[in-house]
Image: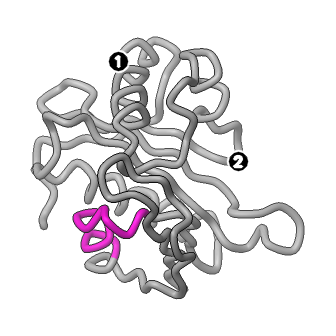
Amino acid sequence: MTPDPTVTIRPVTDADWPAVWPILSEVVTTGETMPYDPAMTSGSARDMWIERPPGRTVVALLDGEIAGTAKMSANRPGRGAHVSTASFMVAAGARGRGVGTALCRDALSWARSAGFAGMQFNAVVETNTSAVALYQREGFQIVGTVPRSFEHPTHGRVGLHVMYQEF
């Protein structure tokens, strides 16, 4: 999918949180794609989502409105710090319009320019087939699946893929 030309990515600001929080809340409480605690508060979500430099958190604007967000950083400290990671959330009403693709491409560009050797996703829910397909289109491979490690609200226990792209 080619991102919608009206998708713009920019760094998150403090003023964006009132628009970012409902996206995170909806994605997490739906419980289908992210392994975060659905009881998290706005404050705890903000502490978890907003990366401190050298990490980065961004928002995706679709027609001028915040429609998604991403965070990116080193996957691990120390001897694992040469590999990056990222997480993405897109508002339900904006899905299928290239927001996730634009966020993924932005994260990959950031990681390459920051000198990382690759990007690893640690927990991609296997039933999130649109995300899996997007990541594969962008060059990621499934390097392993941890079976029955995610409690999906309708499918029960499903696997979490580890996905990787070497630069």
Span highlighted in magenta in the image: 125-135
| Residue nearest the viewer, comparing 9 with 31 | 31
* Crowding near the residue tagged with mark 1, few <14, some 14–19, many ≥20 C-alpha atoms within 10 Å: some
Whether residue 34 sits left or right of residue 53 in the image: it is left
Numbered disc 1: secondary structure: helix
* Residue 155 horizontal/vertical position (percent): 32, 58
34 to 123, vertically: above or below: above
145 to 67, vertically: above or below: below
| Residue nearest the viewer, comparing 160 with 151 | 151
Dot in front, 1 or 2 = 1
Numbered disc 2: secondary structure: loop
55 to 117, vertically: above or below: above
Amino acid type for the residue under numbered disc 2: Pro
| Image quarter of residue 130 | bottom left
Q: Is residue 82 visible?
A: yes
* Residue 47 horizontal/vertical position (percent): 66, 26
According to the picture, the residue beneath numbered tag 2 turns out to be 54
* Residue 121 horizontal/vertical position (percent): 53, 67
- Whether the magenta-drawn stretch holds residue 134 is answered as yes
Amino acid type for the residue under numbered disc 1: Ala
Mark count:
2
x 46%, y 17%: residue: 17
According to the picture, the residue beneath numbered tag 1 turns out to be 19
